[in-house]
Image (cartoon, rainbow, N blue to C red):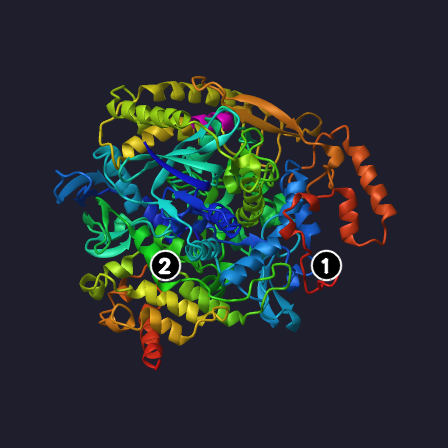
Amino acid sequence: MKLVYTDVLVIGGGLAGLRTAIGVKKRGLEPIVLSLVPPKRSHSAAAQGGMQASLANSAMGSGDNEDVHFEDTVKGSDWGCDQQVARMFVHTAPKAVRELAGWGVPWNRVRQGEREAVVNAERVVISESPEAHGLITARDFGGTRKWRTCYTSDGTGHAMLFTLGDQSIADDIPVMERMEALSLIHDGNRCFGAIVRNLVTGELTAIVARATAISTGGYGRIYKVSTNGIICEGTGMALALETGVAELGNMEAVQFHPTAIVPAGILTTEGCRGDGGLLRDVDGHRFMPDYEPDKKELASRDVVSRRMTEHMRKGKGVKSPYGDHLWLDISVLGREHIEKNLREVKDICNYFLGIDPAEDWIPVRPTQHYSMGGIRTRHTGESTTLEGLFACGESACWDLHGFNRLGGNSVAETVVAGMIVSEFIADYCQSGKSEIDIPTALVREFHEREENRINALLQASGDERVTDLRREMEEIMIEKVGIFRTGPELDQAVEELQDLLKRSRNIGMSSRVAGANPELVAAYRLPKMLKIALCVALGARERTESRGAHYREDYPRRDDSSWLKRTLATWPDADAELPRLAYEDIDVMKMELPPGFRGYGTRNHLEHPDTTARQEEVERTQKRLEGADRFTLQETLMPFEQLLPERYRGRNERLEEPNSSA
Amino acid sequence: MQANPWNLIMTETAPRTLTIKILRHNPQDPESEPRFEAYEIEEAPGMTLFIALNAVRDRFEPSLQFDFVCRAGICGSCGMLINGRPGLACRTLTSKLGPEITLAPLPVFKLIGDLSVDTGAWAREMGERLKTWVHRQEQTDVDQLEERMDPDRAEEIYELDRCIECGCCIAACGTARMRKDFVGAAGINKLARFRLDPRDERSDDDFYELIGNDDGVFGCMTLLGCNDVCPKELPLQTQLAFMRRKMVAVK
C-alpha cells in the first residue's frame, strides 16, 4: 500500500481549493492539492462576469458598503442563509479583491470623466470622479442595489484562477493532477485523509492528513443540461456523504441561470443583462418589465428564470428543434462594448451558434447552473459532524446562499471562504486536537475496500450500461426536479432514482483496463452521483413550500412558519436506497434582517411566529442607537466579528469611508 | 430577427455521415501500437467535436481517451490536431469540416493516451521556470484602498493574460520540435504580460536571465505558427518581436 503523509489534503484545485492551500502554506503547514485536471482547467475558469465586493469606487457604486451587500445577499437567499456567515463574507470580500489585485489580477479600473452606458434600455451618461480614477471598478448584476461586481472583461474567473494557480506555484505547493479521491478515511468521528486514484495509471494511494478540505465545486452534471464543466459531478460532496457521518445541507436548492445558450447549455454571463442587455420573446417584445416592473431583467436569478419559463408556457417562446427558447439581445450595447467587455460571450456566440451578438439576438433559456447546497459546515468550514473534515466554495454549505445565490457572490465566495477556512484549518492543525494516532490497519481497510470495489467493477458483467443509467438520471433530474416542481413528479423522481441506484449494482463493463479507463471512472462515479441526485430529489419532495430557487407549484408560498430551516441529509447505511433527512431551525430571534419581502418576485409568504417580535426588537434598537455609526448598530443587532480569523477583522477603507476609524 | 443565422445552422436537414479517424495509442499498455482507427457517426445539427467524440466513446470505444472540462472554449483542456491543425476540439463545429475528420494528439507534449496529452505538467514546469507571478516586496494591506492602475494598462495586461495554456502554440511551433526546452510563445507572452504589469518589480535584466537565450526569445525562428493557431487570438507575433527587441537591448 502506497502511503503519503501531509498536514493538509485539499481535494479540488479550483479557486476555493487553491486559496485554501495558499492560506495554510502561509501559516507554515504542508498542503497537497489533489485535482482531477490541471488546476488552471478547473471550472472556476468559466466564471465570466465577476465577483461582488462593496468597494464603492465607481459612481454607480457610490454609497455601497457591507450593509448593502449583506441585505442584498440575505434577500437573494430568500432568508435561507446563515446571516452571520453572510456578514463574515461581505466583510471579507473587499479584502479578497484587494489581495488578488496585489497578486496580479488585472481588474478593470475606473476611468475619470463621462462615459455612456445602457441602463433600462436607454443610453445614459455616467460621470466618474477624478478621485476614483484608477481604482477597481464594478458592473451591475441581478438582485443588487449598487453596481458591485468587480471584473476583468468577461474573463474574471480565468484571470483569478491563473493568478492563484501561479501564486500556488510561487509558494511551491504540490498539486497532484489527474488524481481522484475515492473515499475519505475516517473512524466515524474524525477524518484522516483519503484514498485516491491516479486516473492515468490506476494506482491507489492512501493520503493521510491532519486536516482534509473538500473544494470540488457543484453537482450540475446530474442534470441533462448544465452550464457546469463536465467534471462537476458532485462526487466531492458524495465523498462526505458516503462517510455516513458528514451532513449535506439544502441539497434541493439548485440554481438555474436565465441565459445559457441553446442547445449546448453554455453560459452567457449575467454581465450581459448587467451591462444593459434585454430579454425578448417570440414577438421581439421585452417581457420582463411586465412581470418585474422594478428590477426587470435584473431581478435575482431564480425569479428571472421562473418568469422566463412562465412566459414560454404562455406560448411566447421561440420554437426550435431543441425546444422553446427566448432571445437575449445585447446588440443594444453596441459593438465596441461587446468586443471589449463581453468578448467571451462574443466568442461563444461565434463558435457555438455561428452568430455575431452585436447584430443578432442570442437563443437562451434557463439552465442548471449552481448548487447552493453542499457539505454542511460551521462558520469555520469544518463539518458539523466529522472532525478534521473541512469544505469550502460551491461544494460547501456554510451557508452563504440559502435558497438562491446572487450572481457574483459565488466567485467571491470561493476566495473569501478559502481565506477564512484556511486560517481555521491552520489553527486546527497547530492545536493538539489534530494529532493523528490512527492504526495503519484502518488505512489499509479503506485502501482494500476501494481496491476490491474497483477489481469487482473491472470484472462486472451485469446487464446494465453505465451510460444508459446516467442518461436516465439526467433526464429525471431535468424533467422532474427542475425549475417548477410538484409533489407527484418528485415522488416519481425519488422512486425512479432509487430504482437506478439498485440497477447501478448490476453494471456490465466492456473495458477491463486497470489504468486509464473512462468507462471504469464513469462506473464508480455513477452511484455517487445517484446518491447526490436522491438527496436533491428527496429534499425537494419533503420541502412543501417555495423558497428561492426551490419552487413547488403545489406549495407556491414561502412558508416561514414551518420551513425556515435547513435540510440536512446523511447516508448512514451504505446499502440503503435513500438518505436520511433531518432539519435544523434558523433562529429568527438572532437575525439582523428578519424575514420579509424581497422586493422582487411574488409577495405572499407566511410569517414565522417570531418575525414580528424580532422586527420590533430591531426597530427599537435602531431607534435607541439613532445617530450612532453603522458599525455600532450592526454590532448591537448581530455581532459577528468575533467569528472571523483575527487577521481579517480590520475595517475596509473606501473613498467615502477613509480608514481613520480603524 | 426570426431570420437569425442560428436558426439556419440548427435546422439544416439531410444529416451527413461523418468518419472520425483517430490516432490511437496507449503508452501504459506495452502491446499498444500507434494506429489510426475510424468511426462512423451521424452528424447532428450544431454538433461539436466534443459531442462527436463522446458519441464515439459511447457507441464504439468506451476506453477512448480525450480531455474536456468546460466544453466552452475557456479552459484549454481539449487542444488536439484537427485535420492536422492545432485547435480546441470543444468549440469546433463539425459542420465547418468535411465528412472525414482526422484527429491526433498535440505533438511535443507527453502522450497520456489517444487524444490526451499532459499539458498540465508542461504548464507547471513553465510557471516554475519562468517564475510567472508578480514579484514584489511589499505585502498588500487588504484593509486599505487598493493601489491605483491606469485603466488602459489594466486592459492591456488582460489582453495578454487571456492565454489559457492550451498548448496549441507549442504544438504549432517549429522551434519547439527541435529544442525540447524552448519556452515557446506561451512562455514569452506570459513574461510580456508581467513586464507590462507595474506591480511586478522585475527589470529587463531579470527577464533576460529567464529568456535571454536560445531556449527563449533568441531561439524563435519567426515561423509564427503560434500566431496562426492561437485560439484566443493573442497578439503573439507582436509580443515575440517586442520581447526580443527588449532583450537585445539588455547589456
Task: Tell me what residue is drawn at x 59 percent, y 66 percent.
Answer: A135
The residue labelled by disc 2 is B128
Q: Main secondary structure of the magenta part?
A: helix
* Closest to the observer, A67 or A99: A99
Q: Chain of mark 1?
A: A
Disc 2 is placed on an element classified as: helix
Q: Residue B78: x percent and y percent?
A: 30, 49
Q: Quadrant of residue A205?
A: top left
Q: Which residues are magenta?
A: A530-537
- Is residue A534 one of those drawn in magenta? yes
In contact (CB < 8 Å): disc 2 and disc 1: no
Q: Is residue A103 left or right of residue B42?
A: right
State whether residue B67 appears in this view.
yes
Does A172 sit above or below residue A318?
A: below
The residue labelled by disc 1 is A662
Cα separation, mark 2 vs mark 1, equals 39 Å
- Categorize mark 2 by other alpha carbons within 10 Å: few (<14), some (14-19), many (20+): some
Q: Chain of mark 2?
A: B
The amino acid at mark 2 is: Glu
Q: Residue A516: x percent and y percent?
A: 26, 37
Disc 1 is placed on an element classified as: loop
The amino acid at mark 1 is: Ala
Q: Quadrant of residue A441?
A: top left
